[in-house]
Image: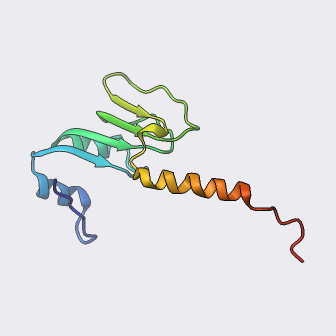
Amino acid sequence: MKIYFLNKLEPELVQIKKKFGNKCDLFILDHYKKGKTYHKNIKSFSKKLMIIDDFNKNDYNCDILLNVSLKNKVKYEKNKSIFFGPQFSIIDPRYNIIRKKTLVNRIKTKKIKNLL
């Protein structure tokens, strides 16, 4: 697996096309300000486009959609692989263990009634 970072001197789509040509198998995009036109440009050289969505936008031109939010309820288009809900989170599972310990400690901690 290769990971590429973009510089700010050249337009990003130009940089991406230079790096990949027509050889990208999967492009993962986590940027809520990019719209359908941008997605279409990415799909012109990538076999698959995966979008990570937290904002419940419904206007994606992608093959795979990942939304790990609990609060979002939305209907997505057919012909997409959709991963919806926190069970698909890509955060390291060890953080979940730490969170559980923190929540237990909060319950055990007495609440402050008066600070001064």
Q: Which quadrant would the C terminus be assigned to in this image?
A: bottom right
All told, the count of numbered labels is: 0
Which percent across, then down, holds residue 59?
Answer: 42, 35
Q: How is the image coloured?
A: rainbow
Residue furthest bottom in the image: 116
What residue is shown at x 81% (from left), y 62% (from top)?
111
- Residue 81, above or below 96: above
- Kindly identify the residue that appears in the image at 39 percent across and 33 percent down: 83
Is 89 situated left or right of 18 in this image? right
In this rendering, position of residue 4 left or right of residue 59: left
Horizontally, residue 54 falls left or right of residue 63, namely right
Image position of 86 (left or right of 27): right
Q: Residue at x 49, y 51 (%)?
A: 96
**Residue 60 in view, yes or no:** yes
Q: Is residue 61 visible?
A: no
Farthest top residue in view: 78
Q: Position of residue 16 (x, y in %)?
A: 19, 56
Quarter location, residue 112: bottom right
Q: Nearer the viewer, residue 7 or 41?
A: 7
- Please provide percent x and percent y for residue 88: 41, 39
Viewer-closest of 94 and 49: 94
